[in-house]
Amino acid sequence: MEPQTTQQQPMSAVPSNKPRAAKIAAFAVLAMAVIGAIVGGVLFTQREADNQASASALPSAQVHISAGGELSPETVQIKKGQAVTWTNIDGSMHSIAQMPGTGGSTAEGLGSNPIEENSSYTYTFEQTGTYAYYDALSSGHQAGTIIVKE
């Protein structure tokens, strides 16, 4: 009896799913990366929108100017991008001006023309810092502070 020989096919002739599986795995990784980038971008954009909306949704601060230029409250804390409104509830005219020489922050354009009784002046603070101001028309030159945080 003669030994039987079997012919083996070369490895390259044997069908393999390895290249196809590698392509599928690479596609899956790429797809997950794209989806992650989109979701991350959406979440970041939404977070930024929420931050902006929360700053604008908060009411602006109110300061009342009464007899003798008394400011109430004297110190106000707000977020960057919010406004402060000064309302004259006194019969005399008042004017908001930045306090010179305090070493604090300065805000371009902060300062009012004379504010008549029952009228208001509003200023929006776009930069963080501590701003000192006073009533330039009152005899006591009452002073106040606006603290603007991020």
Image (cartoon, rainbow, N blue to C red):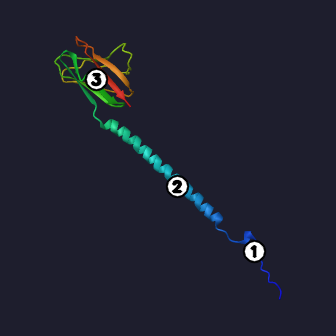
Disc on res. 32? 2
The numbered mark, 2 or 1, whose residue comes first in the sequence reads 1
Give the amino acid type for the residue marked by disc 1 in the picture: Gln
The residue positioned 35% from the left and 13% from the top of the image is 100
Q: Quadrant of residue 145?
A: top left
The numbered mark, 1 or 3, whose residue comes first in the sequence reads 1
Quick one: SS at disc 1? loop
Give the amino acid type for the residue marked by disc 2 in the picture: Met
On the image, the x and y values in percent for residue 46 come to 40, 45
Q: Name the residue under label 3.
A: 75
Q: Name the residue under label 1.
A: 9
The residue positioned 44% from the left and 44% from the top of the image is 44
Q: From the viewer's perspective, is residue 117 above or below residue 24?
A: above
Task: Give the spatial CA distance, label 2 vs label 3.
Answer: 51 Å
Quick one: SS at disc 2? helix
Disc on res. 76? none
Outermost residue to the right:
2
Give the amino acid type for the residue marked by disc 3 in the picture: Thr
Outermost residue to the bottom:
1
Quick one: SS at disc 3? strand
**Mark 3 neighbour density, 10 Å: few (under 14) some (14–19) many (20 or more):** some
Q: Dots 2 and 1: beta carbons under 8 Å?
A: no
On the image, the x and y values in percent for residue 110 come to 34, 21
